[in-house]
Image: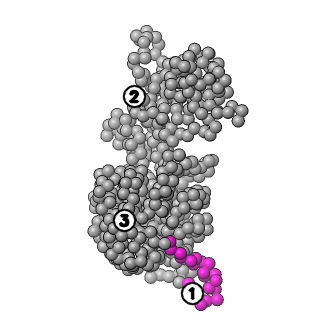
Amino acid sequence: MPTSPKHAAPSTSSPLALVERAEHPEFVPPAPLGIGLLVNQELLPLVEAAPDLVDYIEFIPDLLWEDRGLGAKPRFSEPPVAAAFAQRLSQLKPLVAHGVGLSIGSAHGFDTALLGHVAMWADRLGYRWHSDHVSFTRAHVEDGGSPAALMGNLPLAYDFETLDMIAARVAEVRRLIPRPFLLENNVDYIRFEDGDLPEPEFLSRLSARTGCGILLDLHNLYTNSRNHSFDAWDFLAQMDLSRVVEIHLAGGLEFGDLYIDAHSGPCPDPVWEMLAHVLSNAPNLAGVTFEIESSHVERTGFIEIAAQLDLARAAWLTNRPAPEFARCR
Amino acid sequence: MSMKDFQCVLGRMIAIPSFARAVALDAGGESNANGAMASYDLEERERTRAIAAAGGTRMEVLTLLYRGARAAPIMRFCAITCELLGEDRLHDLLVAYWEQGPRSSAYYRDEVRGFASFVAGRDDVEPSIKDAAAIEGALVELERAVMPERYREVRLGDEVADVQPVLHTACRLLWLNENPSASTDVSGGHEKAPRRWPVLVDSRRDGINAVSVLPPSEVALVRECDGRRSLGALCEHHGVRWERSSLAHWAVLMARSNPAA
């Protein structure tokens, strides 16, 4: 495996330890919460009717504010309905934010204005932690103008250059938002197999260099393993699971010869198997979140969604150390 | 490595399938000065990655996901327009719309408004469908309209002589291509038909009630509500009896709560 001296593991006895410590900020995982649900408008009635189903609520703040784009004045606005929804969520359960707009892997620049807006919401709503994706969502597709919003989280090459770029940005995120920050492993329908690092090592090094945690999306991992014919268990073996703070679970759809991370319903069995393993081997895990896309909520039904949450809780109770039982059902 | 240019190529392949097809053919190596990627500053590894990505069905899936995400708000918020177009014409129009260029905004209002404007500008779309697109586009745009601070609605029963109104932020006057209400045409065809028909779109009201036909006098009054002219004078000038007007019943106008502020 190629290594770069610049990216070697930090020395604890070197005269440059102070400098190295600055380059490897402390990783402080949040207190464990338990089982969570990514809540949208369609799922709010479920949480209000059966609050014991979850220990925390996760939401996507980018979908609530309005962003008129780079350079617009004012750039952001907050429709009263959206602000009220966020406030309601924060009143129900501890709140966790899952961003989709940082585009932390975009080579066109880092949107620090957006980061400032994220910071404002974090302060207002008191997130326990927040997260985004190891990907990019914006790129200049045509000459001139703002980078196009390409929708979805596009793949990065897991190169040292990418690692350096993202590490610097994570430092900025942590400076502006002094709350635990996690980065999620991406679902990549296209992968660049000639990267400098395998993905799990890339993620582990990123966490080690920056102090950020990892949001391990097991369904993304499952999807990638199916579409790119690798063993997800090899990925888990290479991953530093001590950096995993949150797990995402979801279901998907077959689409031709591909499997799509559609957040369309129940988790497939291999995801549950991986969950049991990670629960037993991730000492700093704080939460397991089930995701379902709003358009699939009605078809899946509240009973099935509640069943998925119950399965996650059963796995947590079975595989986590006893003192962490946040709730027993 | 020029990561920026590489991400440009990747994004462009997703947004513009013809570019992906051209890149797939661009296997001439670094010396291919006329290739699809010739204008991009790419290292050899990036060129190889781009060509490998372009050639497979996975790029088509990424394009499908990208276009699906763009289509979803259109099909939800322009449902009537889509229904009137029918599946085949809708598909053709969406493809033509997407080929205009990638979206710069990730927000559904911009997508819906963009598509509505696109449909309105097409010569091959019937006037009635253009009207539907205009109305649905306006409703989405007005959906999250917020009355500015220190403004209030001007309602039935308000003293209006000195009020200086503007059109409510939740409302818009649209000029349609076709007469939205044949019953209002009492001319029996003897009068010259107007080229465009005004309707009021009000996002505070649901369904069919969101679109209303105003009498010509009230339309003319609304067009002159610029925040500087008194409502009393406007009513007198246009022959509108405020207490009997649709403008009063539906609170279509707004004004500063304290004009001195």
* Residue under pointer 1: A11
Q: Report how far apart the C-alphas of labels 3 and 1 lie in the structure.
A: 36 Å
Which quarter of the image is occupied by the N terminus of chain B? bottom right
Q: Nearer the viewer, residue A38 or A327?
A: A327
Q: Nearer the viewer, residue A48 or B108?
A: A48
Q: Is residue B47 left or right of residue A116?
A: left
Q: Is residue A285 left or right of residue B160?
A: left
Residue B193 in the image, given as x and y percentages of width and height:
46, 16
Q: Amino acid at mark 1?
A: Ser
Toward which corner of the image does residue A327 lie, by quadrant?
bottom left
Total residue callouts: 3
Q: Residue at x 46, y 23 (%)?
A: B213
| SS assignment for the magenta stretch, majority | loop
Q: Nearer the viewer, residue A15 or A37?
A: A37
Secondary structure of the residue carrying numbered label 1: loop
Toward which corner of the image does residue A251 lie, by quadrant?
bottom left
Q: Residue at x 50, y 23 (%)?
A: B246
Residue A30 in the image, given as x and y percentages of width and height:
50, 71
Residue placed furthest toward the right: B260
Q: Residue at x 70, y 35 (%)?
A: B261
